[in-house]
Image (cartoon, rainbow, N blue to C red):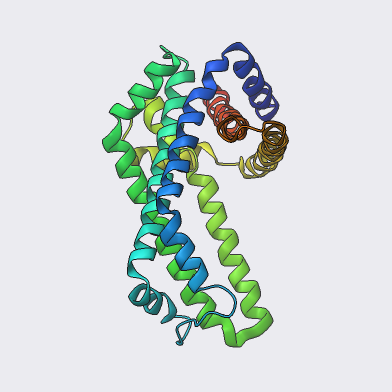
Amino acid sequence: MGLIVSLMAGVFELVKRPTAVLPALVAALFQTGLFLLAWEPLFSLLFELGPGAGMPRGSLLELPFLLLVRFPNEISVAVLLAFFSLAAGNWLVFSYSYLFRKEKPLGTLKAMAAALKDFKQILGLTVFLFALGVVFLAFTLVLALALKPLAEIGAILLLAWLVLGYYAYLKLSFTPIAMPFEGVKLREALKRSWRFTRGKIPALLLLGIVLSLVTSLLSNAGSLASDFVEEETASFLALAFFLALGTAYANIVLVKYWLVGREK
């Protein structure tokens, strides 16, 4: 029931308050700007590692270190791009949490400003999640290397590890919402997200599928809209708007899902 209510509430809020798209649009433009700044070293890295390129020789475990030695600047740029994109995503969640909280909700611009004032909390959250992701990828790499001789059994065990990682991701996914909503620090927000998602994993999987479909449809609509616009800047803005609309809807639905779940 909470799932349906949240999905409907997302549509209702966007119709009622069209300016709710603004935080997602700002985040999308910020992330696009980051990508454009990082484009040259990223393209260079992809070109060097593309088909027919000379990959560094070494074991699977040695490969990341060999790549880091060979492409230190390019990999540093890629890491910074991922980090700041994650930070922008966390700022976005904070903004929508302030915008749609039950007690004293803020206007769109005030919600965005309030999220900016939580810079230290967002930075701490981003560092934690980024470090967690790096550790998970490192363990996945080591595990893949260790299980390689086991063939099919190793593949099954590796898949189980990836499923476990996704389970942990779902359990902690409401941490950025819990922090501004309930005014708690990172450690307590992690605990509350873990408790909140107890028994909700099937619903969250379904919610993820629905939101992916909606954002995909809006992305395709944006591509079609941009094709009809000849002027380059207007075409880009049309695409950015539809992408931001999908992002805004997904964030609003998640915030509403938190609200419905906490009221029970």
Question: Would you say residue 177 is visible in this rendering?
Answer: no
Quadrant where the C terminus is found in the figure: top right
From the top left corner, tell me how far across and down residue 60 is, in percent. Answer: 48, 81
Residue 155, how many percent across, how many down?
Answer: 64, 75
* Residue 49: x %, y % from top left: 51, 73
Q: Residue at x 49, y 81 (%)?
A: 55
Asked whether 81 or 213 is in front, the reply is 81
Could you tell me residue 212's position as x and y percent? 67, 41
Does residue 237 appear left or right of residue 185 in this picture?
Answer: right
**Front position in the image: 136 or 215:** 215
Among the 4 quarters of the image, the one containing residue 144: bottom right
Q: In the picture provided, is 180 more to the left or to the right than 229?
A: left
**Is the residue 254 above or below the residue 137 in the image?**
above
- Quarter of the image for residue 121 reads top left
**Residue at position x 51%, y 67% from top?**
46
Name the residue rendered at 48%, 62% in the picture. 43
Q: Residue furthest left?
A: 120
